[in-house]
Amino acid sequence: MFTFRKLALPRASVVFKTLWRFAAERQEVFFRRLQGEPPPWTADAVMANYRFTNAYRVLDRVSQFLLARVIYHGPQLPEEVFFRIMVFKIFNRIDTWELLVRQVGEVSWRAYDFVQYDHTLTEASDTGSRIFSAAYIMPSGKSIFGD
């Protein structure tokens, strides 16, 4: 049995305020880039010199491709949409999706053929093509911390 307690309201702190300032400025950087302004898009030295994901993940190039070319392109039956999303997200790479479309045609649960997909992806990998994105890989920190 679960016991529910009322949680205390969050208290504003230096960390909380810093996080929101960072998120707001990160979004402003996105808008400046989108409007075609030349860099630097911020006076913040860290944001100007390092890459960060968008404040809203859906705004990145790969997520936009997923929406426009994977989710809403093809039959809208739930099992077909789910299959396309899962295939795309396993690799999370536009080039891999486009390779599959070129080689197997419509990516579809109804027409799925393991042997054909396996052959296409194995051949691409064996010839040196990257088929996976590093988007979800968390580096160990070895290059910075030494172990």
Image: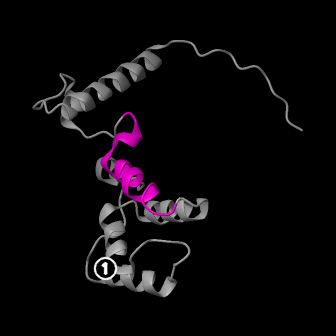
Main SS of the magenta part reads helix
Q: Is residue 67 above or below residue 27?
A: below
Residue 101 quadrant: bottom left
Q: Position of residue 75 (x, y in %)?
A: 50, 63
* Residue appearing at x 19%, y 27% in the figure: 45
Looking at the rendered image, the quarter that the C terminus falls into is bottom left
Q: Is residue 21 above or below residue 111?
A: above
Q: Is residue 7 magenta?
A: no
Looking at the rendered image, the quarter that the N terminus falls into is top right
- Name the residue that disc number 1 marks: 124
- Left or right: where 115 falls relative to 53: right
The stretch in magenta equals 55-75
The answer, for residue 143, to whether it is visible in the render is yes
Question: Which amino acid type corresponds to the residue marked 1 in the rendered image?
Answer: Ala
- Left or right: where 92 falls relative to 108: left
Q: Is residue 103 above or below residue 60?
A: below
Q: Position of residue 67 (x, y in %)?
A: 41, 50
Q: Residue furthest top?
A: 12
